[in-house]
Image: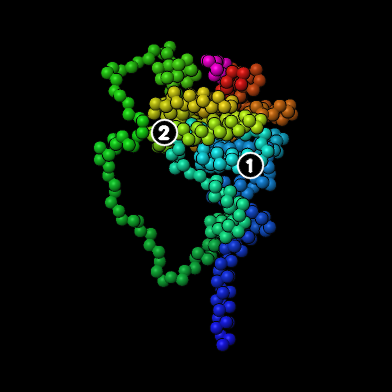
Amino acid sequence: MTRKPTFFVTAMTVVAAVALAPITFNVVVDAYDHNRMVDLDLDKSEISVKAHYPLYKMIEYPRVKAPTVILGDSRARALQDKYWQELGRDDVYNFAYGGATVYEMYDTFNYLRENAELETLIVSLPLRSMDERFKGGMNRVPEAIALANDPFGYYSNWFVAKIGWRLLQDRYPDVFEAFEGLSISPVSEAGAAEFAALEHLSVEQLLDPDLCDDCILTTPNTALVLPAAFYHRGLGLGYWGRYWPEITIERDLPRLFAQQVGTNGAADWRRFKQSDELWAMVEEMAAWCDENDVELIFFIPPTISEMQRRISDFGLASANHRFRERLTTMAPVIDLDYDSPFSQELSNFTDAYHFGSTPARKIVGELLQLIDKDPERTELAHKRRGDLICPVRPQDMTEQHSEGTLELIEGESCRVWRQKNG
């Protein structure tokens, strides 16, 4: 009579132990610093963040509550908090995610307007992000908010446990290598490749119009040659064409850069189509900032000049300009993505899309001067300038032009687009 209850209790104990194992593991390892009770000296700022950017930042931000926030993708993420702190600004939080979409920026913005007292919002917004198909319309933010606000859901989550395991592997590689060297199977693993026939596309398939939305052009009867004096006016740029000269730089690029310009550049723009839904999100963010006295600044991060040329290669030069024009109706635009000495200097970049840490510090310094008038901090920022100078002061300005309500002021490798008297 006593064996059945004993067996039942034992079985339930085993089941409970198995069920509680991931919870206990997550409480101790705590891959995303939900409780920070145990310090195991794990590299969470690198491994955990990159595995799920929004989750890490949704858990971290409530401890910071900074009034100045940066939204955007990996280019915006490069403008790290520590670079602002070096200039005396401890109230800036970088809420950017690697590979972020406008959907994610918008949901993060909605979180902020309900949970923060914003004073300044800097939104990094390259043209490429305005296609709803960018990154497959990915949105990791709702899940991040749900897990950050649900301790039980967080501690029982297998993804969190998986990242915790990866953290331990990174911290104690020798221990894990020793365990991996032990084999309980008499059969070794084969390293055979999957057998499958190569897929061949016919010429008809390659020329399928569905592979290229809105890019079928009529063939002119004769070649169109524009006099040099017309600049890009014939491409829909009007007088502004003189500020978008043809990019003629020719040089051998490092292998990674060349591959990105050729392959990624074509993928970026071949089927590019701006989304009304995404524009509505951007406009809603701008309207809220205007209504609540939050300073809004748009930032267009730089790419190398050859990557910029791909925009014109796919007939989007006019769209590229009008993108800036439309943004200025909502807020000033800090633009570094045009052909300039800065974008031509490859040492400023780690690849065709991303700038390095030294340029990132310079960019932070220029942004600081636009939002902060403290003389000590702006003086520190001036010392970082070098080959990048935004037209913050009258003496910084090298060019100024306006057409209608749109105004452009230019410094060295930095432009500010804005509405007149805006």
Q: Where is residue 351 in the image (x, y as percent from the top left)?
A: 49, 37
Find residue 26 and report its image quarter. Answer: bottom right
Q: In this view, does 334 lie above or below 49?
A: above
Q: Nearer the viewer, residue 120 or 187?
A: 120
Whether residue 53 is visible: no
Mark 2 sits on what residue? 272
Disc on res. 114: 1
The quarter in which the C terminus is drawn is: top right
Q: Horizontally, is 304 left or right of 40 in the view?
A: left
**Magenta-drawn stretch contains 262:** no
Q: Which residues make up the magenta segment? A: 399-408
Residue 393, above or below 54 = above
Depth check, front residue: 343 or 57: 57
Position of residue 328 in the picture relative to residue 212 (left or right)? right
Name the residue: 30% across, 18% down.
223
| Residue at (68, 44) in percent of width and height | 64
